[in-house]
Amino acid sequence: MAVDGTWLKEQVSLYRKEYPVYKAYADALRRVLEEACATRAPNSIIQVRAKSLSSFAQKIIRKSEKYPDPVHHFSDLCGARVITSTQEESDRVCRFIRENFRIDEANSEDAKARLKTGEFGYLSVHYIVQVRSKKLLGVDLPREIGERKAEIQVRTFLQHAWSVMAHDRFYKSEFKVPKTLERDMARVAALLEEADHEFERVLGSLGVFAMNYGVHISPEERQEEMARRIAVLENEPEEANKPAEALRVARLARISGEWETIVKYLSPYEGVRGKAGTPALLLELGHALCRANRGWIRGRKVDVKKARKYRKGQALLEKVGRPDEIGQDCAAHPSMERDETRARALYTLAWSYENVPGEELKARELYHKAYCCDPMNSYHLASFIEFEIFCNKDRSFVPMLRPALLKAIDACRAHADAGIELPWAFLTMGRFLLLLGHPYESLSAYAKGIHLCLSGKVCAPDDVLDAETDFLRRINFGRKYPQPEQWVADFLLLAKALKPSGVSALEEIREKAPRKKPFLHPVVIVAGGAHADFQNEMEGYKGLLEGTFDRFSGTIISGGTTAGIPGIVGGLAQRLTDGRGIHVDVIGYLPRSLPKHVQMDRRYHELIDTEGDDFSPHQPLMNWFDLVAAGVKPSDVSVLGINGGRIAAFEYRLALALGAKVGIVEASGRAASELLPDADWWNVSGFVVLPCDPMSARASVRSAGVPADHGAIDRMAEYIHGKFLEENRWIKTDPVMMPWDRLRPDLKQSNLEHAAYIREILGYAGFGIRPITEGTSGPPPGFEEKVELMAEMEHGRWNVERLRAGWKYGPVKDSEKRISPFLVPWSELPDEIREYDRTTIRNYPAVLARVGMEIYDKED
């Protein structure tokens, strides 16, 4: 049907008069959406326009039959489009639009609602809106807008890509699109929808990783990075960029609990408005003010100045969290968006009330709201459950939460695998597993969390372990801890006693320690299988243990029974003291009441009674209580593990968590073998998988280490390396062939440890070291006859040194990847490789002569 030319001119003329109003409408709408997206979708693209006269004319020609009065009927004369990074951001923008504009529901559309279950295609939300106030987000809305309508489209980048590249070409084309092409485009739409979901998941994880930035670097690296960030902030010429830089400094400072530093750098930007980081900045500042002034109340005394700052911090957290907008029953707010920053503010606000006497119910309410605001957050769930139990003095509801707790454990596991939320991912897993009645799995998770806290592998506040102690106290609301929870409490106490700030914990350890005596050094814990079903198998390791501890002086600790590995250790106790004059203590830790099928081994030199009527994690914990109380450093303790059940599995992880050296005998089965594929412990310093070889096991528990003042050792090590280069000039490509001053650190360490272990090897063969008495000394009589024995010991030392440096066994040598086919027992070593060790031993006299020493026969 032809369009009446006169009518067309009249409509265009009418719109020409309206156009300035719609242009003002578009300008105001742009500013409103920019303010809204600054916090809801910071990286979004905002497109706003008033429909041009030519575009208006073209549309009324096409739509003349449907719209007889287009100037007043068209709802898109002012149009806006918000293109966001993720669907979650789109949802936030949509919620803002619904909350702040009048919506013409009849003419608004969510394209997703049109698609059937199996269909894929155009996805976008179209709102027809009218303003309902004179001012919005600080933007004055022109009075002349009146009741005029505007269209706002909201979509993600990928939805926009589909719209631009496919939707308009397919569904606004002048021809019918073939079915085959429709199918192809539906497939592309499905891929884009899946990509949208994956982008959101990955960006969410990246956001969490960014929040944890600084946790994964050493304290020294973090300080260097913070100094760089402060320099950038202080030299930033644009004032608008400074809040974001200050926030980066604050997040680094938060990792190590430098709360006053955060207050210093964020306070100048507290009043900045309209910036993407404003809620996050206020959250960090509020948290820091509360943390820095948490001691404002002590007993009945109140520090007024600190109290004022503490309450200011709470006010900032309330500003971000907006707790009053969430009712007591969060289920009554199904439209409430997931907002991680707001949830963190509520969570931190809850923590602030947790530290105010008498405000536990307020803390519980806020933890609940934090969880409602971000129900995917496992850490918010953990604190909510903690306070729900504490305030109600009741744990009976916990089994009903089993599905949610299992899902939360999976989320924590995913965080741990991604290297984020550490150490909290492991500690929170420990909490949930304890509540679900899985104490050994809980102890395993706590072991890794404690290891991260003590090892310095991640930066964490000093009070992170105190929070776990508080958790145990609250879920038991004044009653005696059940046994599994007491194990966790004792484990946490040990960890706190090993921290520089752990003076009071150390005093408590000394009070509870059952033995209260010093220990002979070195200290070796032998853990392993003691079950009757594996008795014959364990007897097969008797030769290994006898070779490992032949002529041993020091302390050996084991299970104190006649069964399995502890029984073999009992035999060692008798053998080591049969007229040899060797100083050795063999100590066993036993429950006070032994099970009927278990027999105490009286051959042990000392048997320590502990609480309980069966073996449990309590015995290894009390063993470590005694060691720590006696001032023994965990790094000076070695653990040798062979087979074992769930108690031994805990014993291995307990030792690793505290910082001891742990050697597990390869292929010995059960707990020992189960530790090998556990990725949480793969790269832990001090953990090695030993071949079933007495000399390797001996080196793992007897390694002398390199003394702090090692001038003579340095000279010996350099000489050893020089001799190696001289004797192996034909090797050209191996990194080991570099000169001493250019040698790779791990290879240089190998030579240092070799030099330090010389005295141990010579002593076992019956030789000693003394200053040269008459000129240059050669080997003493009988030296050559014992070269083979000493070479075997040297190979065992080399095995352990390589394994601790991260080398693995492999059939083909690859020095760059640290793979060697020679990490095997002496009996499996090719003779041409054994010759290297023999040559090394024969060089001992020359090596020692370099530092003015000689070898002598002790019997002479």
Image (spheres, rainbow, N blue to C red):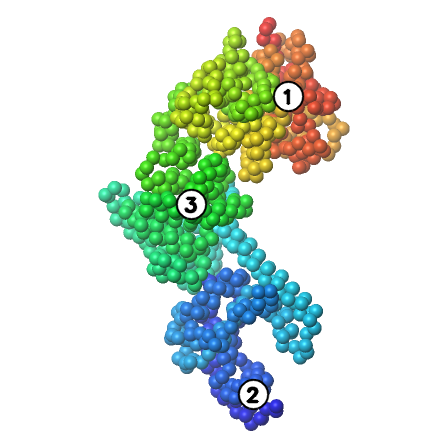
Q: Is residue 213 above or below residue 191?
A: above
Q: CB of mark 1 within 8 Å of CB of mark 3?
A: no
Instruction: Please state if 46 lies on the left or on the right of 741 as rendered.
Output: left
Mark 1 and mark 3 lie on one chain; the one further toward the N terminus is: 3
**Residue 759 image point, x, y percent:** 58, 17
Quadrant assignment, res 747? top right
The earlier-in-sequence mark between 2 and 3 is: 2
Mark 2 or mark 1: whose residue is earlier in sequence: 2
When asked about the image quadrant of residue 755, the answer is: top right
**Mark 3, residue position:** 399
At a point 52% along the width and 20% down the height, the residue shown is 563
The structure residue drawn at horizontal position 40% and vertical position 23%, both measured from the top left corner, is 592
- Residue at image coords 53%, 25%: 531
Residue 316: x and y in percent read 36, 56
Placement of 16 over or under 746, stated as above or below: below
Category of crowding for the residue at label 3, using alpha-carbon neighbours closer than 10 angstroms: few (below 14), some (14–19), many (at least 20) = few
Front residue of 436 and 343: 436
- For the N terminus, give its image quadrant: bottom right
Judging by the rendered image, the residue that carries numbered circle 2 is 65
Q: Can you identify the residue that label 1 sits on?
A: 794
Report the quarter where the C terminus lies. Answer: top right
Q: Find numbered disc 3 in the image and state the secondary structure of the residue it sits on.
A: helix
> Between 510 and 118, which is closer to the camera in this rendering?
118
Q: Is residue 702 above or below residue 273?
A: above
Of tags 1 and 3, the one toward the viewer is 3
